[in-house]
Image: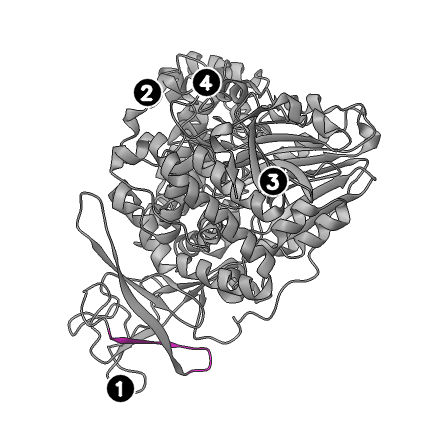
């Protein structure tokens, strides 16, 4: 039958087909047309093969992807999907067929392929599941447990709470719902913005999917069929934020080699066997094989892949983890527990291997059975039932329909296990750390006085998490929403762009107590104490505050009481962002400054010295001069793009980490913003044609397309693009008209 692809004035694809399967094919085709390079990067990342064209900088990720067995997990999940839900499996296959049909032409138009000498590969039926898993496996921040181990090791368990805040490796979102009693239409409005690392092209794709069964607009994940996170079917709309749940466990393993398999990493004896000590006191076989990672302009790297009954070993331990006759890193004297020929990898937590247990590897389910029901949803009850099948990541969901239905709930799969599992690395050989089913029913939130806000704060997901975002964004949004009862969809853009920084209070409070400052420092102090606490791009006071904050962070991190945390164990590179001290101090600055005592650190003196430092060399411009967008691009050398060869090419930004406009820098290291709103949306439930959205760059990933970066100026200013619903206002893309 005929598949039609239309475009609006911003190049957003509007797809129309005869049924859901034909529509999935069209979505894959259009995505390959617009995002061929992005799709191939994501496919390679899911397989752990990106270093072959991106070079050594991608090796850390590829090593993790291989050891975590992401591609194998995706294969298993798709096989299980075919068995449990053949309709959805066939729908995913249709999407993959569309991608494979469109990739050759899409790659021809994308200069990145020529730049790195890469030819587009073939997508497999499970590739979309691999893309989803690779995108979200670090979403719950399990490496934060490595950080807690370091804090306990150096400062003791009481110190963990001082650093318990939204860490540098996590992603969050804002989302809010207002009911009809607070809107001009009498119907609900849902709005928000997901916060992720900003990538070019963007991690979300504006799209419309229409067939006789449904007609849905929303934000898709390139490489994955359907519209998972943010959608509007015409009668019901939904949106999500990260629930900050803890559903991934790390186990310290005791492994031993049997036979003549050699040592980890030495490339010897691929047939060697590995055993892991279980909680029953017995040694159990672990799977083991080696893989080769190709590296552009470098030598291939061999990686040993081990999986125990808990899960894949993602941290092998020390560089000689099985030991030899002259070294004994675990202090076990090299004795074999059972007198056999194997070497016991023992109990030193600083060098023991660590395995990862996470739901998709256990259940062979990534929640794809929720995707078609979401597209077919007509009421809140339909959305609610669809999210019962949601698995990964764990999210807070809000939804509303034209009949007055409302939804505020947590969706996903969280294992029931001991409290120790949730907070730290646990010993695999000790009883009591097994998973004992799944948390059910999932918690539900409320809508109070016509308002519900989700911003990664403690809320309905509290029983499922350990660390949450500070409450500032949620508190600010609720306060702003509570000021009116006549909200329209267009009004929501101002909330997206709110720049008030409540987390500045602890530092400014300490600043207010300082005396005996130099005249320059006293003047700086007085300016900041009269500052309105808004991080606007044109504010010189915001720039000065950021400079003082950065100096305080650096001085705290350098203090001997905390500096010992700068020497974490030699964990793999992919986990290092969670272990870096300066970002940890930066994002925990509030609690560090407010704590009753901080290991003997004279915080008044730290703040005094920081103020004097900045007064002696004050910033010369406004916040936006240094707080500039720094998107990630998947290229070993992105300078071929005219937008990349000059810092001034990327815009200065308002906002900060704890503002509603969450454009995250890393105080103490850089003012550049690598994280921020990966999209903004406003769903007018009563009148879908009044809905609005914007993405950081544009609909197309092709550099010479007029829609490559055409939304960037709007995104910077806070403007939104209308969601077009009238087919007569669209232009047919006849190039991609296809008969099937």
Q: How is the image coloured?
A: one colour
Q: Nearer the viewer, mark 3 or mark 1?
A: 3
- Tell me where residue 516 appears, x and y as whole percent: 46, 19
Q: Nearer the viewer, residue 615 or 356?
A: 356
Residue at 60%, 29% in the rendered image: 502
Q: Give the residue at mark 4.
A: 624
Give the mark nearer the N terminus: 2 vs 4.
Answer: 4
Question: CA–CA distance between discs 3 and 2?
Answer: 38 Å
- Which element carries disc 4, helix, strand or loop? helix
- Which element carries disc 3, helix, strand or loop? loop
State which quadrant residue 3 falls in.
Answer: top right
Q: Are marks 3 and 2 in contact (CB under 8 Å)?
A: no
Q: Give the residue at mark 3.
A: 17
Q: Which residues lie in the magenta part? A: 271-281
Residue 211 lies left or right of residue 606; in this view the side is right
Q: Nearer the viewer, mark 2 or mark 4?
A: 2
Q: Give the residue at mark 1.
A: 340
Question: CA–CA distance between discs 3 and 4?
Answer: 45 Å
């Amino acid at each position: 039958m005929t598949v039609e692809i239309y475009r609006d004035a911003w190049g957003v694809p509007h797809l129309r087909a005869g049924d859901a399967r034909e529509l999935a094919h069209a979505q894959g085709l259009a995505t390959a047309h617009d995002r061929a390079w992005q799709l191939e990067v994501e496919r390679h990342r899911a397989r752990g093969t990106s270093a072959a064209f991106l070079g050594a900088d991608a090796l850390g990720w590829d090593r993790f992807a291989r050891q975590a067995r992401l591609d194998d997990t995706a294969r298993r999940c798709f096989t299980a999907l075919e068995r449990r839900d053949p309709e959805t499996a066939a729908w995913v296959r249709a999407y993959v067929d569309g991608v494979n049909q469109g990739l050759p032409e899409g790659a021809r138009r994308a200069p990145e392929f020529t730049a790195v000498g890469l030819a587009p590969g073939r997508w497999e039926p499970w590739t979309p599941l691999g893309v989803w898993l690779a995108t979200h496996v670090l979403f719950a921040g399990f490496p934060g447990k490595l950080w807690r181990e370091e804090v306990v090791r150096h400062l003791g368990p009481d110190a963990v709470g001082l650093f318990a805040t939204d860490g540098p490796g996590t992603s969050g979102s804002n989302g809010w719902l207002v009911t009809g009693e607070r809107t001009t239409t009498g119907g609900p409005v849902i709005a928000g913005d997901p916060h992720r690392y900003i990538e070019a092209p963007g991690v979300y794709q504006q799209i419309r999917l229409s067939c006789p069964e449904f007609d849905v607009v929303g934000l898709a994940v390139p490489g994955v069929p359907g519209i998972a996170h943010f959608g509007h079917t015409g009668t019901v709309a939904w949106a999500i934020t990260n629930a900050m749940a803890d559903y991934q466990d790390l186990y310290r393993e005791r492994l031993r080699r049997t036979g003549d398999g050699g040592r980890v990493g030495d490339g010897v004896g691929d047939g060697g066997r590995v055993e892991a000590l279980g909680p029953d006191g017995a040694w159990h076989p672990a799977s083991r094989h080696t893989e080769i990672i190709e590296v552009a302009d470098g030598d291939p790297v061999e990686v040993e892949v081990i999986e125990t009954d808990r899960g894949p070993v993602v941290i092998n331990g020390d560089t000689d983890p099985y030991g030899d006759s002259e070294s004994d890193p675990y202090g076990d004297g090299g004795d074999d527990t059972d007198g056999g020929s194997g070497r016991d990898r023992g109990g030193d937590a600083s060098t023991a291997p660590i395995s990862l247990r996470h739901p998709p590897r256990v259940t062979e389910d990534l929640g794809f059975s929720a995707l078609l029901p979401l597209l077919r949803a007509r009421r809140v009850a339909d959305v609610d039932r669809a999210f019962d099948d949601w698995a990964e990541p764990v999210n807070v969901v809000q939804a509303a329909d034209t009949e007055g239905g409302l939804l505020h709930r947590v969706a996903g799969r969280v294992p029931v296990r001991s409290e120790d599992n949730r907070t730290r690395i646990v010993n695999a050989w000790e009883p009591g750390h097994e998973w004992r089913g799944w948390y059910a029913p999932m918690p539900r939130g409320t809508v109070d006085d016509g308002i519900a806000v989700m911003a990664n704060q403690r809320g309905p997901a509290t029983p499922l998490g350990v660390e949450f975002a500070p409450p500032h964004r949620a508190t600010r949004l609720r306060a702003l929403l509570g000021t009116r009862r006549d909200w329209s969809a267009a009004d929501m853009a101002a909330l997206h762009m709110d720049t008030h920084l409540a987390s500045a209070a602890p530092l400014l409070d300490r600043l207010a107590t300082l005396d005996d400052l130099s005249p320059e420092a006293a003047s700086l102090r007085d300016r900041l104490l009269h500052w309105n606490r808004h991080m606007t791009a044109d504010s010189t006071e915001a720039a000065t505050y950021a400079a003082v904050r950065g100096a305080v962070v650096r001085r705290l991190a350098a203090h001997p009481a905390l500096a010992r945390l700068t020497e974490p164990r030699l964990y793999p590179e992919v986990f290092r962002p969670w272990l870096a001290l300066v970002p940890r101090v930066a994002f925990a600055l509030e609690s560090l400054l407010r704590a009753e005592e901080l290991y003997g650190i004279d915080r008044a003196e730290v703040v005094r010295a920081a103020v004097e430092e900045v007064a002696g060399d004050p910033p010369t411009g406004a916040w936006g001069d240094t707080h500039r967008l720094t998107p990630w691009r998947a290229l070993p050398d992105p300078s071929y793009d005219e937008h990349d060869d000059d810092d001034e090419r990327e815009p200065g930004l308002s906002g900060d980490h704890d503002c509603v406009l969450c454009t995250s820098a890393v105080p103490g290291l850089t003012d550049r913003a690598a994280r921020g709103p990966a999209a903004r949306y406003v769903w007018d439930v009563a009148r879908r044609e009044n809905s609005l959205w914007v993405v950081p760059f544009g609909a197309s990933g092709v550099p010479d397309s007029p829609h490559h970066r055409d939304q960037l100026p709007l995104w910077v200013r806070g403007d939104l693009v209308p969601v077009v619903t009238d087919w007569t206002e669209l232009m047919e893309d006849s190039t991609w008209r296809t008969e099937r």
